[in-house]
Image (cartoon, helix red, strand yellow):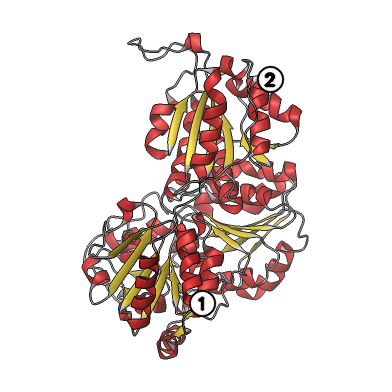
Amino acid sequence: MKASDYIAESLAAQGVTHAFELVGGMITHLLDSIGRKGKTRLVSMHHEQAAAFAADAYGRMTGIPGVAMATSGPGATNLLTGIGGAHFDSSPAVFLTGQVNRDEQKGSRAIRQLGFQETDIVAMAAPITKLARLVNDPEELPSALEQAFALACSGRPGPVLLDIPMDVQRCPIDAPIPPASRRAPKEPDPRAIAEVLDALAAAEKPLILVGGGLRASGAVESLRALLHHVQLPVVHSLMAVDALPYDHALRVGLIGSYGNRWANQAIGRSDLLLVLGSRLDVRQTGARVDSFKENRTIIHVDCEPGELNNRVTGCLAIEADLRPFVAALALAASKRPILDRPDWLREIDAARIDWPDTAELRDVPGINPNEFLHQLSSGSPLASAFVADVGQHQMWAAQSLELGADQRFLTSGGMGAMGFALPAAIGAACARPGRPVVMIAGDGGFQLNLQELQTIARNGLPIKMVVIDNGCHGMVRQFQQSYFEERYQSTLWGYSAPDFAAVARAYRIPATTVERPEDLSLALNFLGRDPEAPALLVVKVDTFANAYPKLAFGRPITEMEPQAVPLGMEAT
C-alpha cells in the first residue's frame, strides 16, 4: 500500500484515536490518508506548538503515545517547545514531520538549504527526544514506526520524532501492520523490596515522596494498593498532584518551592524518605541540599540511573521501573503486619490545621485564589482532568485543588511552558470523550495560545476554561517585588490583556467575568451549566496577590516566605 496509508493504518493499530496537526504541504499525503481511512480522528489546531501540547496531554491521559504532525521548516520547528515539554515530563508521544523530497535535500553540500523550507529538524530535536530519525528509505518505514511507538512507552516514557520526506510518503510499502507492543520492564530485585520495607518499619517518622515518574510508569494504582498495608503519609511533587485523591487519609500535600507549608514541615521532621519517581530538583528540595538530606535516610527509586544520587547524594539508590517495583512492594507488604505510625500522622495533621492553605493570603482584597480553587474543584465532580498553565495560578491550583480518585492534574513541569493549558486541555478532552475538562490559566499564559479557542468551538469540546486574571505576569512580578525593588518592567509595566469574556464570545463560546467573592457561586453555576459544552470564566484577583507560602531561597525547606526572608537571589 501507499506509505502514507501504511502510516494511517499503523496509528489505528497502536490505538491512537486522535492525532493533532496543522496542515502544511509536506504532510498532505499523511493527512489525506488518515482522513480517508477514518480510524484516527484528525484534530486541526491553529499552531504547531499547540498540536504538540495536545499530543503531550493525550499521551499522559491514555498511556498511548500522543501523535502530532507538522510540515517541514517552520511547522517542524514550532513543535520543538512541545517536544521538549514531553521529554522533560516523561510523556509518551510520537511526532511526525514532513520533509522535502529526497532529491531536494542538501545532504553533505556546504550550503544552508536546497529545498524550500528544508530544515534539519532531526538535529534540532535529537537532544530532547528518545530518538529523532530521518526516514529516507521507504523500506525502513515499518520498522521505524514500530520502534517509535515501542520506544515512546518503554523505560522512562518520552517523545520520538520521525522526519519523513514527501516522496517517501507516497512510495509503495509491502509489509504487515504490526500490532501495538510494549517492552516489558525488568522485574525488581526481591532483596531491594525487603530492604525498603525493613527500613520503613524501623523508622519513627517515615514519609513517602511521589513524583511524576509514578504516573509515567503507570504505578498509581499499585501505590494505592501499597497504602492499605503501609499506612504512612505521602507527600507529592507538582507532577504528582493526582497520585492520591484529595480526601485520602494518607495524602499530606504538595512539597517544594511553593509547597503546602505543613508538607514541607513534614519533610523537615521525617527520619526516612522513600522517593518514588521524583528527580529531587531544586524546586522540590530548595537550594539547601545538605539540609534536605540532613538527619534522614533517603531511599531513591527511579528507572533512570542518572537521576540517582545526582543533586541529593548519599541516598540508597535503587534503579527500577516503578510499576513492577511498587506492585512488588505492595505484595510483599501484604504478607507483613500493617505498618502504621498514627502519632506521626496526627503530628502532620496538627501542622495542617495550624497553617491552612486558604490562610496564606487571608488579607488579600477580593477573591482569595486558594479558596476559589477549592470551590472550583469541589463543584467539578464530572471533570476528567484539571489542566493548569504556568504561573502563580499553577501553584495555587497544586496547593488547593480537591481531586477525585479518577481525576487527573496536568501541567508543564520541567519545561514550564506558558501557553500549555489551553491546547493540553484539548488533548485531554479527546483522550476521555464525553467528560468535561477544567482548564486553569493566568491572563498572561492564556494569551500565548489563545487561537485554540477556535479549535474548541469548532469541535464543541466540553472544556471549562478559567482565566485567573491578575492583570500581570504574576510569578515574575512577585520575583521583581522580592529582588528588583518593585520595578515591574514587562510584567506590569508595558503589559496588558484583553477582555477575555468578549474574546470568547467572539468565538461563540459562552463567557462571563466575576470580581467579587459573593458572586462566585453564581459564576461557577454558569461555568458548569452545560457539561457537554465549552464555557469560559474570568476570575479577577488582586494584582499583588502572591503565591505563598514560598521557600525562602538559601534556607531549609521548612522556612518559607513571607515569615522567612530569602538569603540570596534565587536562580529559578
For image coordinates 50% across by 14% down, the residue present is 116
Whether label 2 touches label 1, CB < 8 Å:
no
Is 113 placed left or right of 97 in the picture? left
Check disc 2: other Cα within 10 Å, few if <14, some if 14-19, many if 20+.
few
The type of residue carrying mark 2 is Met
Q: Would you place residue 291 above or below residue 569 in this image?
A: below
Residue 158 position, x and y percent, is 47, 44
Q: CA distance from mark 2 to mark 1?
A: 53 Å
**Which numbered disc covers residue 1?**
2
Residue 466 position, x and y percent, is 61, 59
Residue 190 position, x and y percent, is 40, 65
Q: Quadrant where the C terminus lies?
A: bottom left
Is 94 placed left or right of 119 in the picture? right
Q: Which residue position is annotated with label 1?
A: 334
The image shows a total of numbered marks equal to 2
Check disc 1: other Cα within 10 Å, few if <14, some if 14-19, many if 20+.
some
For image coordinates 39% across by 54% down, the residue present is 303
